[in-house]
Image (spheres, helix red, strand yellow):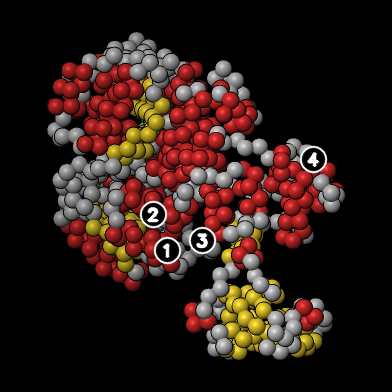
Amino acid sequence: MNESILEVKGIGEKVAEQLAFMHIYETNDILQYFPYRYDIYEEKPLQELVHDEKVTIKGKVLYNPSLTFFGKKKSRLSFTVEVEGIAVKAIMFNRAFAKKQIQQGQDITLTGKWDAHRLQITVSKYKTGKMEENDSITPVYSLKGDLTSYKFQKLIKQVLDSHVDDITEILPASYLENYKLPERKAAVRTMHFPESRVALKHARRRFIYEEFLLFQLKMQLIRKINRESTKGNEQDYQVNKVESFITSLPFTLTDAQQKALTEILKDMKSAYRMNRLLQGDVGSGKTAVAAICLYAAVTAGKQGALMVPTEILAEQHFQSFQTMLEGRADVALLTGSVKGKKRKELTRQIENQEIDIVIGTHALIQEDVLFKALGLAIVDEQHRFGVAQRRTLRDKGLDPDVLFMTATPIPRTLAITTFGDMDVSIINQLPSGRKEIETLWVKENMFERILDFIQERVKQGEQAYIISPLIEESDKLDIQNAVDLYHQLTAYYDNEMEIGLMHGRLSSAEKDEVMRDFADNRVKVLVSTTVVEVGVNVPNATVMVIYDAERFGLSQLHQLRGRVGRGSKQSYCILIAEPKGEVGKERMRIMSETSDGFELSEQDLQLRGPGDFFGRKQSGMPEFKVADMVHDYRALETARQDAQHIVENNLLQSEDYKYLKEILSEEEGLLEKLD
């Protein structure tokens, strides 16, 4: 199967060059180059045909075709076909040769664009005589250069006929039997030359499962390597002290918080180093879970660290942790603002374990910060930090347990795929007593009424955010921008209230100052770009206005909406949008009706696809040939469970799994690390 493509009859240097653009170098590559879609021609009764759509009809040719020429070498062939007792006119352009093939009295199947008003079909594909089922399925390939589908399929047929016995079955027989999957040989042939829709469905099912299984096996092996190469620190925390701390909190943990907490504490007690992702919707109480876990580490004689993306967020966490842990643990704040003697003294205390818990920004990972016994490191909003930054924190201390937290609800489908080398805990429940945020979708002509509504809320002592997608005016995009909005509001309110402006071009210090003024209620209305998305807790802010809301994804809109509704007062999220397309309208409708972040993220995934959900470049999302993580999520879940079973029970060493092992061995050093 690794024979050079140049060995195949009919493939010279020129064709090989075109195939190389498609990453086809060996015979195996061409057989694995599956169609990206199949055109299925389904015959329907005349009355069900839709005007201007592609249709397939069968009939009998009533008269021999007439051929006329026009322009330069252009031709028009027309003939009449009897379909269900009705005369239908058929037109074919630039296929003069067909005149000899189509004759009166013949059975014919035609595919093309239907004109219901004229009872006419403009033919793109035809077949005389009886049509077999496989004729109604046409594979469509993504081809480069002047390679035609006909020529490409001819090459595939050649390779298949000469190499069919070299196609090795890689799945154990028990899997084929349990899941009723076709053998690899038959499935490869069916993918390129489908005999029927049922056979094609099963062949696709086989390759979807195979792709997912190989991917999940890699993930599970990486996870096993990570666990076995780094022993944890077996934190023997004091259960009674932790329970006493939970009881002292001014609220009761939700069932979801309790479940996540149990999973994390179990990891901390184990001999392996924890590598867990904690997902929780905005306001679901991840911080409380983090505080309990950090305190548990302290009762085990260890230190804890919490790293957050901004100084102001670090300060806010520091204040709430100090209040919660008063008399139980020494908490310190370490940010870029802590300098000179103060910093030196603080790093000395951390190194001597005079400090139990350190909360800070990336200042925590500077070289001069040394922990004596770091037991638990928590990274909040983990996607905001680079991989290297996260690793540096993880490598401080003696193999600390690591917990990554995110308020971006990632659909379970993606979480188990993208973070397959991590364990995932989910808090999908909001604390009781929270008022649901009212979400309204309006058009731009309502803007003045919205400004009046904000003024009313400010008079009641409340605050508001107004979010815009751009900082300054852009010629390319006709959308409202932050600087313009700021001037517009300043003029409208005529200096009656303090308005703040925040965007990504401000320095960290400037951003912090604006945010602090807003948090302290000196600024009443904050005009901002999405830099406010992962932000501070301002319980007094009750109105979130999002301009040009159709330009944001559902998850981002939900994150922004989560900036309000943090206090006891009723809060509002107003989406100003005039989407042109159906997807944009659907997004606004879903936002207005759904407040559950996980449900929204699933819907976002359906609308945008996995690549867009994460942004392809940074996500490292796997590219599958046949499988689709959104639509085939059940197969993904099954493959994950099977991969887990194979790796945990060391089945790759047995004869049935030898071909899977061979494929995985090609992955650089993956299996050697386990041996």
Discs 4/1, front: 4
Tell me if residue 268 can be seen: yes
Number of numbered discs visible in the structure rendering: 4
Quarter of the image holding residue 193? bottom right
Give above or below for 182 relative to 298: below
Distance from the alpha carbon under mark 2 to that under mark 3: 30 Å
What number is the disc on residue 474?
3
Q: Secondary structure at mark 3?
A: loop
Q: Earlier in the sequence, mark 1 or mark 3?
A: 3
Q: Tell me if 14 is positioned left or right of 672 in this view.
A: right
| Location of mark 2 (residue) | 603
Residue 14, image x and y in percent? 84, 52
Q: Amino acid at mark 4?
A: Ser
Q: Earlier in the sequence, mark 2 or mark 3?
A: 3
Q: Secondary structure at mark 4?
A: loop
| Location of mark 1 (residue) | 584
Q: Tell me if 344 is positioned left or right of 32 in this view.
A: left
| Pick the front one: 152 or 171 | 171
| Location of mark 4 (residue) | 4
